[in-house]
Image (cartoon, rainbow, N blue to C red):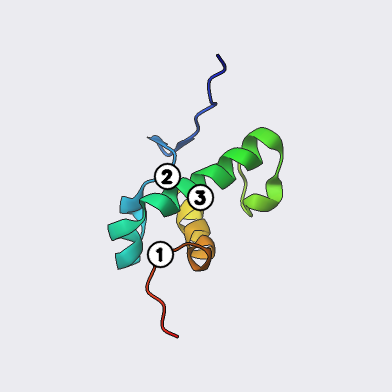
Amino acid sequence: MQELNLFKIEGSVGGNQDWFRDFWMKKGGCGAVTACDCCIYFAREFGYENLYPYDSQNLTKESFIAFSKIMKPYLSPRMRWN
């Protein structure tokens, strides 16, 4: 059985929704963290660098937060004002 190569961001395994600065992302951002972590994983492990616009080999909390802001419009459910 093959194991996943887990990555750490400043001591945390993957991202953390408590890092988000947006109220709704912090409150219900578990799916957002998963989506961001998956993109980072595929960039690191399979070379899909277009999925993560920052350095996937040198992860920081700030780059993760910035990436979550890029990802936010693509995630749902969320409040939409049409």
Disc 1 designates what residue? Answer: 77
Marker count (numbered): 3
Q: Which mark is residue 36?
A: 3
Tag 1 or tag 3, which sits nearer the N-term?
Answer: 3
Q: Which mark is first along the chain, 2 or 3?
A: 2
Q: Is residue 1 above or below residue 45?
A: above
Q: Is residue 75 above or below residue 12?
A: below
Helix, strand or loop status at disc 3: helix
Q: Callout 1: helix, strand or loop?
A: loop
**Residue type at the position of mark 2:** Gly
Q: Is residue 50 left or right of residue 65?
A: right
Amino acid type at circle 1 is: Pro
**Image spot of residue 14 (x, y percent):** 44, 39
Which of 43/28 is in front? Answer: 28
| Quarter of the image that includes the C terminus | bottom left
3 or 2: mark nearer the eye: 3
- Badge 2 is on which residue? 15
Q: Are marks 3 and 2 in contact (CB under 8 Å)?
A: yes
Which of 73/63 is in front? 73
Q: Which is more toward the observer, 13 or 32?
A: 32
The secondary element bearing badge 2 is classed as loop
State the separation of the CA atoms marked 3 and 1.
16 Å
